[in-house]
Each structure stands twice: as structure tokens, then as C-alpha cells.
Image (cartoon, rainbow, N blue to C red):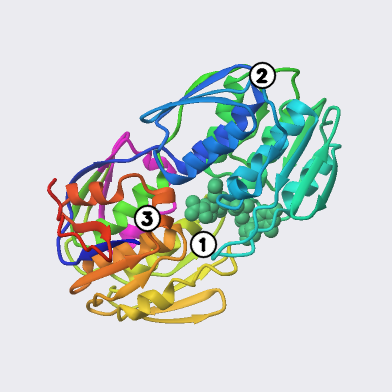
Amino acid sequence: MEKLFVTGGARLQGTVRISGSKNGALAIMAGALLASGRTTLRNVPKIGDIFTMVETLRSLGAEIETNGDWLSIDATNLTSCEAPYELVKQMRASFCVLGPLVARLGRAKVAMPGGCDIGSRPIDYHVKGIQTLGAYVDTDHGYVYAESLRLRGAPIYLDFPSAGATQHLMTAACLAEGVTVIQNAAAEPEVVDLARFLTQMGARIDGAGTTTVKITGVRELHGVDYTIIPDRMEAGTFGIAAAITRGDVTVTAAAPEHLEPVLPKLQEVGARIDAQNDSIHFRMVDRPLATDIMTMPHPGFPTDMQQPMVALLSVAEGTSVVTENVYERRFKYISELQRMGADIKQEGRTAIIKGMPQLTAAPVTATDLRAGAALVVAALAAEGQTEIAGIEHIDRGYENLVDKLCSLGAEIYRADSERRGTALCLA
Ligand code: EPZ
């Protein structure tokens, strides 16, 4: 079984290019099902979740070609309305093909995604929203069945500004008859980018990026050529890695405006940040300072940055308080940081982090994507060599993480733990 081996101590220095947004690309790939035509996507990250979504769309009859970060999807002739469990269980975002399938074919059978290590991850907002748009929906034996001759626009209120539900229902409403208004909608950059993509396909969408999104249904959408936005979570992760190693890193092909909630927090802990058009320069000279964080829907501090940020605060000067307001179980990785010497006390949705001068290497296991990022960040500054298992989680969302970190001077490699390699960074 492959693991990551990280020897802490190197100060990261240099420039790294950010890949396209995982969460942006996944929603757009589901949206491409709405067009009876070919859509070309550029700047698509080469990561596990994208490969899973490609297989899901192929299982529905879409013709897909891939070449590097380029991807074409022709959904003209869909041959199936069923998204199988073995694909949906791997990745929750594939559940969002349900709305486009009902809109295009009049019916859909999609496996329920199930929970994961950060929370129960229910889909009640999605199901209720599709029902509100006039579909007959039933759940049976772990599948959601939906049928409608033509969806009808309607007002939808989300109890929580769910990013996925906003994206899914906005997509489904594009081909509905009449007007849909989603209230208490999510405003994440990936929601705004999906609306921009759908509008280029011929959809009529107003208000994306605010709490009220209005979609006026049209009869047909066409394929487009579209470039995915940068991955703000990858950019943030590299900024945090630069901070914990007291390094000097510039991330390029990034979108600083998408990191508005994160950059001020990194400045609070002492990072010097210079954001230009599509690059962000992170420098850290001294030990980070403690700060407090509350995760919130956008434009609040993003929950996906909570875990790497707690790793940074584990070696800060002072005590930090981090409150996770989005997921009910997103602190599971703390026990792994504690194995590395972190002094963290969890009380419900709040973690109290007493900064230590330095963490120490230990064998640890990633339990989800951002937990894996947190363990890599911690290992980069820990004394000794840390072994990280569960790296399949990291491969789901970070493209070429080892190569990119090596190019910045990190001592990191991946190897089969049984036949432990000696391959160090040759970059
Ligand atoms: C998206 O997940 C992202 N994933 C997540 O990133 C991200 O953490 C999350 O949005 C919040 O920003 C993708 O875009 C593929 P939600 P999503 O619906 O849409 C509750 C990563 O690491 N909820 O905004 O599934 C839910 O339980 C991943 O890249 C319901 O109760 O998140 C949670 O508490 C992790 N019922 C809250 O809303 C529903 O029907 C926010 O979830 C839907 C959600």
C-alpha cells in the first residue's frame, strides 16, 4: 500500500502553478449533460474525483475524450438514466447528475451517496428541490428515483446555503418550464462559475453569487468551450504550507479574489501576502501567531481550509480557537495531529489549539481529502520523517502534490510501504 514519506524542516521556496478547481469542474461536468452537443472543458485537474465523474458520465452514454487538462463531453445521445452505486459511493458530487438526467430524459435512478468521515452528508435539500420542481421522487433500496415529463419552475428555499444543492438545483432548473428562484442559495465561487458556464450554454440565470438565484427555463442548451477556474483550496493549502515552513512561495494561475476569506487569516498569523492578478506571493519569516477561526459558507472562512489551518495553528505562538460550523464531524483528523505532538482539545464543534514549538514525526493516516492535506502540512514542519497512509484520499483532490512540493524543496516522496523506496525529490 502506498504511503507518503515526508521529512520536515525544509523551507518551501519557489513558484508553483495551481490546477483547475475540483469542485468547480465536477459541477460543470454534471451540467454538461444538459446540452445535446459537445462541450470542451480546459484547465481540468487530473485527479481521482474527475476520473470518477468521467466514468459516471460514460455510464450514462456520454462520449468523453480526455487529453491532459482538456476534456470533451458529448451528451447528445444519453443511453442510460441510471448512475450506479459503485461510482456514486466513491464521490458524492456524482449524485448531481440526477437533475440533468430528469431534465433531459424525463427520469433518473441515482444511488444515494452516503456519508463520509466529515459528516452524514444528507441529500434532503437536493431531493426536496427536485420534488419542488415538479418531479415524482421516491427512494428505495439505496437509490433515488425521479420522473417528470418536464420540470416546472418554482420558488425553492434552502434551509442551509448548501453549495451542492444550489449547483444541482440551478442546473436542473435551466430546462424547466417557467421561473425558479432559489433563496438562501450558496455563493461559493464554484456556484458563480457554474452559472457562468450554464449561461454560455444558453441558460438564463441571474443573481449567482448572491443569496437569491433566479433561473428562467429555456427549451434547449448547446455545448460550449469553457475554462475551469483555479482551485482555491489548492492555492490556500500551498499558502499554509509556505507559512508553516517559514518559506517564500508564489502560486500562479490562481484567483486571489476567491481566497478573500483565507488571506486575511494568514496575514493575522504573520504571513506577508502580495496578491496580483493571477498570482499570490506568500512569505513567512517567524513562527506563526495564534488566531481564532469560524468556518462559514462563503464569503466566510471555508470549511475545506479548516483542517490544514489547524495544522498550522498547532505550531503557532499562543492558543487558537477553531469552530467548525458547516460539518458535524470534521475534527476526526485531530487525533492524528495529536500523535505528532499537537496539543488540541475538542469540545463539540470547537477545537482549542495550544501551539507547540514543533511537532514530531509519527505514522499517521488520512481519513479524508483535507485531513490528508493537514497531515502533509504538519509533516513539512515536523521533526523527523512522517509516514502518511490513506493517500488515496489526497489523490482525489490534489493534482501531482508530491511533484509540486518537491519543486518547492520539500523532502517528500511516495512509495509502497512494504518496498520502501529511496526515491527522493529529483526535481
Ligand atoms: C461541497 O460539498 C464541496 N464538495 C465540499 O468540499 C465543501 O466542503 C462543501 O461544498 C461546503 O463548501 C464539492 O463541491 C464536490 P454542502 P457539498 O451541501 O455540496 C448540509 C472538499 O474537500 N446539507 O454545502 O456536499 C451538509 O450536511 C469537499 O473538496 C444537508 O443537510 O456541501 C453540510 O452540513 C468536502 N442537506 C452543509 O449542508 C443537503 O441536502 C453544507 O454542505 C445538503 C447539504
Q: Is-magenta flag for residue 379?
A: no
Residue 393: x %, y % from top left: 43, 57
Amino acid at pointer 1: Thr
Residue at x-position 66% and y-position 20%? 77
Query: How far is the residue under mark 3 from the one under mark 1?
Result: 14 Å
**Does the closest atom of ligand 1 sit within 8 Å of the Cβ of label 3?**
no
Local crowd size for mark 1, using a 10 Å CA cut-off: few (<14), some (14–19), many (≥20): many
In this rendering, the label closer to the viewer, 3 or 1: 1
Quarter occupied by residue 2: bottom left
Residue 64, which numbered label?
none
Query: How far is the residue under mark 2 from the one under mark 1?
Result: 36 Å
Residue 264, which numbered label?
3
Local crowd size for mark 2, using a 10 Å CA cut-off: few (<14), some (14–19), many (≥20): many
**In the image, is residue 138 above or below residue 67?**
below
Query: How far is the residue under mark 2 from the one under mark 3?
Result: 40 Å
Query: Number of marks in the image?
Result: 3
Residue 315 is at least partly visible in this image: yes
Horizontal side, residue 55 vs residue 15: left or right: right
Q: Is mark 2 on a helix, strand or loop?
A: loop
**In the image, is residue 421 above or below residue 70?**
below
| Residue identifier under label 1 | 295
